Image: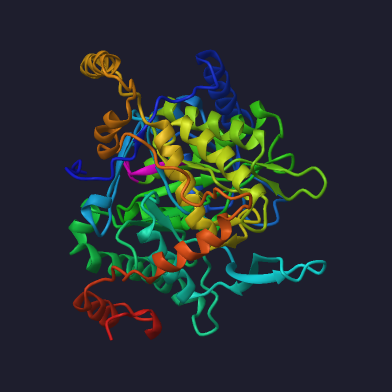
Amino acid sequence: MTEPDTFRQGTVVKPYERLNAEQIELLDDASMKILEETGIWCYNMRAAELFAANGARVEDEPGAGAPCKRVYFPPAMVRKYIAMAPSKIVLGARDPQNRLLLDAEVPRVYFGSGSETNVWLETELEEFQSTSDPKRKLTAPRYTEKRGDALLLARAARLGEQLEHLDFFIRPVNVQDSDISEDDHDVNKFFACLNNITKHVQAGLTTQNSLNKVLKMAEIVAGGSEELRQNPVVSFITCVFKSPLQMVEDTTDKVFDIVEAGMPLVISSSPQGGSSAPIQEAGMVAQINAEILAGVMLTQLIKPGAPVLYGSVAVRARLDDLHDLYGCPEFNQYNNDTAQMARHYKIPCYSSSGVGNASTPGMQASFEKVFTHLYMGLTGAQYIHYSFGLLERTNTFCPLQALLDNEQVGLVKHCLRPPKVDAESIEEVRKMITKVMKSSHRLFTRHTRKATHAGEISEPYKFGAKEQQDGVIPRAVAELAKVEARPGKHLPAELQAKIRAEVPGIVDRLFTDK
């Protein structure tokens, strides 16, 4: 793949490295021992045969509830095929300036959306009156849940186009329309996104059989088959492992088809510390690393050099109800470590931030999100999802929260910028100090203009208030209305007509060419 001349610049950070070199070697060794001595439970016979043909020891695994093979991998085999994964990947976009350059050896960070929530949370403002003083009134938010559908997903994509700090779009809302069959789920999902956003689009496949229709649509958008491989406007997520250490049948079949089609994909694993993985940091990281390495190895056995992302979504269990617990120190620690492991293997890293346990926008949501946005940005993971609009873990998408996250991610990106300290800038400010100290006022105010115009100075928090009342939500509601009123950047009418003619199953209400 040719490196693009234009792409989103992202934020190149100086990574915070929690693990030292010795700890990385220990975790790598532990993962290799897991794959060699414990092995994986492989429910996909095609994968098991491919592993066996290339040096793995494969045995029947009776009592697994379905046809299953136990696969043991020699470390030399793992290292040979992991080394074939490319360190540099381009993810394309309708607008060439929105392409992403993921380089495992450059900690350039991008933030995007994620999950596939069933619930859309709408926000309205309502005025309340004091019972003790009727003259006192207060405006407060009232939230309404809606069932996710194709039009709401299209609306989320239109919003994502307008959020300047959202670098890529993973469908955050599930398509649950009663008139869309499972076989047509994927074409509606991808079209709802592609027709409303010019940034990179990524999602999982609901059914394996829909891949060709999705690729046909993407080829029309990109301008042809070869053009799509050079500018992959879509890519795919494959959660190939059910933790602990079980390679599932259906998703593995999708991996074969996606890799053979020459499209980028994420090998994602999401064990829960305390239930499907050890809660201890060392155990969690050793296990998830083993699972991801086995998945990446499979992609390289299918097609050497296949573009693949190391997808780590390590979470911790609440100990009272075993639900996922986000926005906690262990979440950051697990995912910081795996970002370092991905860098160790020179594979671009798909990671997570901005997800928490709060059910509505507010103080808890802000704390949980900034806590992970900032920390995970510091890891240098190249592709950070879940960062916009998620509430109640990964169960709810709220457009108002996405707008608030956009503001927070923007400030985090500004924080993570590399320092501008060099001989030229030092000389410039030294002269400035000398000049100001010769003046009568001795103030630097008029000298801020140049830095402000150059974008070097951050703006105040957009939704802040000067009065003694938190006005964040009302201000954000007003801003969201303005943002959503902007015209959408839809596909040209001729491309929509071509997709309508050649890709069956897309509902009429998603087209905007009428």
At which x and y percent is residue 238?
48, 53
Compared with 188, 351 (above or below) is above
The residue under the point 73% across, 50% down is: 323
Viewport quadrant of the C terminus? bottom left
Q: Of 160 and 20, which appears nearest the observer? A: 160
Residue 399 visible at all: no
Residue depicted at 55% across the width and 72% down the height: 148
Q: Is residue 13 visible?
A: yes
Q: Position of residue 233 (x, y in %)?
A: 29, 57
Q: Is residue 69 left or right of residue 300?
A: right
Magenta stretch contains residue 12:
no
Q: Nearer the viewer, residue 402 or 90?
A: 402
Q: Which residues are magenta?
A: 303-310
Q: Residue at x 31, y 65 (%)?
A: 215
Report the side of 283 relative to 252 (left or right).
Answer: right
Q: Nearer the viewer, residue 408 or 93?
A: 408
Magenta stretch mostly in which secondary structure? loop
Up-down: is 104 above or below 69? above
